[in-house]
């Protein structure tokens, strides 16, 4: 059983019990960072966000049966009050718990069913190359996002490309898209930029320092419209199948002369640091 499958199994088994990200990661024998990164790539949600949605989905089913009081359902879902549960329920589904209880149906609610791997997202990938790389710095522009809101990343590149010449002491040959600072709620920082040997970062630019590491290097070949499938396959199949454990350091995309930014076609390398 892979890490993600084990995490989902444990969440479903303990859906009504108090649970923290650290405990869940410990049960899966990985770091919280690793589990959050894996969850984001596969499910599109942070682990605790997924658990919250699953608990509210179970609660919606209980309310639709109409036999239990709302407070009892709220307590089973891990909420300490009617008010807190109502706020969370309405935020998730757009309707009040009392509405579902009265209607006796969950029809039209955006329920979160137990996650299963999307076979249609799995693509054929060549085996990774293993490479060592020293520490380096990337300077550019950054944004905070999740895998649910990653549409901001193409816009970030659109903002950065006209400003490439502002990067001090650039190292020619490639541009980098760096994923770093993964948080428990699923947010991470994405930096679009160039490698630089500068020690000073201009005030209106951002930077990320990437430590020396050993990497598994995968390739996405083709149009960027299929890039998400490549990333999904890496985190859900290629890494687990190879028994590789990512390190808690930034991973990055490398865009060199093999990629045409005008058409979105070409080869992109995806560097995953290994523990």
Image (tube, rainbow, N blue to C red):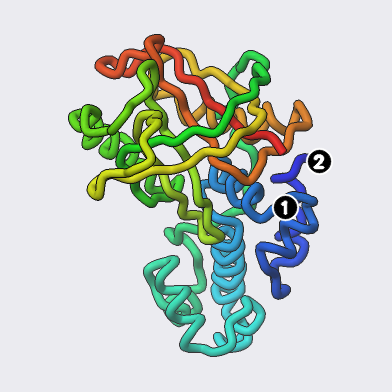
Dividing the picture into quadrants, the one containing residue 199 is top left
How many numbered badges does the structure rendering display? 2
The quadrant in which the C terminus is found is: top right
Label 1: how many Cα within 10 Å (few below 14, some 14–19, many 20+): many
Q: Indicate left or right for 275 with 254 as reference.
A: right
Dividing the picture into quadrants, the one containing residue 244 is top right
List x then y, in percent, for residue 152. Answer: 31, 43
Mark 2 vs mark 1, CA separation in Å: 10 Å
Instruction: Identify the element where label 1 is drawn.
Output: helix
Instruction: Identify the element where label 2 is drawn.
Output: loop
Tag 1 residue? 7
The quadrant in which the N terminus is found is: top right
Task: Using the image, tell me which numbered label, if any, was put on residue 271.
Answer: none
Label 2: how many Cα within 10 Å (few below 14, some 14–19, many 20+): few
List x then y, in percent, for residue 253. Answer: 47, 28
List x then y, in percent, for residue 62. Answer: 61, 74
Q: Is residue 9 above or below residue 93?
A: above
Residue pictured at 24% horizontal, 29% vertical: 164
Tag 2 residue? 1
Residue pictured at 59% horizontal, 54% vertical: 113
Task: Of the two numbered discs 2 and 1 on the same chain, state the one appearing first in sequence.
Answer: 2
Residue pictured at 55% horizontal, 55% vertical: 46
């Amino acid at each position: 059983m892979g890490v993600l499958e084990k995490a989902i199994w444990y969440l479903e088994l303990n859906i009504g019990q108090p649970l923290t990200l650290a405990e869940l990661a410990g049960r899966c024998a990985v770091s919280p960072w690793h589990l959050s990164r894996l969850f984001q790539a596969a499910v599109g949600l942070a682990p605790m966000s997924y658990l919250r949605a699953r608990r509210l989905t179970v609660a919606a089913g209980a309310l639709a049966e109409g036999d239990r009081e709302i407070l009892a359902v709220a307590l089973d879902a891990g909420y300490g009050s009617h008010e807190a549960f109502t706020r969370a329920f309405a935020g998730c589904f757009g309707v009040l718990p009392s509405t579902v209880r009265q209607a006796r149906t969950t029809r039209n609610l955006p329920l979160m069913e137990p996650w299963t791997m999307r076979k249609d997202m799995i693509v054929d990938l060549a085996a990774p190359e293993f490479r060592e790389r020293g520490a380096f710095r990337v300077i550019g522009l950054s944004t905070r996002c999740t895998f649910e809101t990653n549409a901001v990343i193409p816009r970030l590149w659109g903002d950065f490309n006209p400003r490439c010449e502002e990067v001090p002491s650039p190292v020619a040959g490639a541009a980098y898209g760096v994923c770093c600072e993964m948080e428990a709620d699923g947010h991470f920082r994405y930096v679009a930029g160039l490698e630089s040997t500068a020690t000073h970062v201009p005030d209106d630019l951002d930077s990320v320092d990437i430590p020396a590491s050993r990497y598994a290097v995968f390739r996405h070949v083709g149009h960027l419209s299929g890039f998400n499938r490549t990333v999904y396959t890496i985190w859900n199949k290629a890494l687990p199948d190879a028994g590789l454990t990512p390190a808690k350091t930034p991973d990055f995309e490398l865009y060199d002369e093999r990629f045409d930014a005008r058409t979105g076609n070409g080869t992109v390398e995806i560097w995953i640091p290994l523990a």
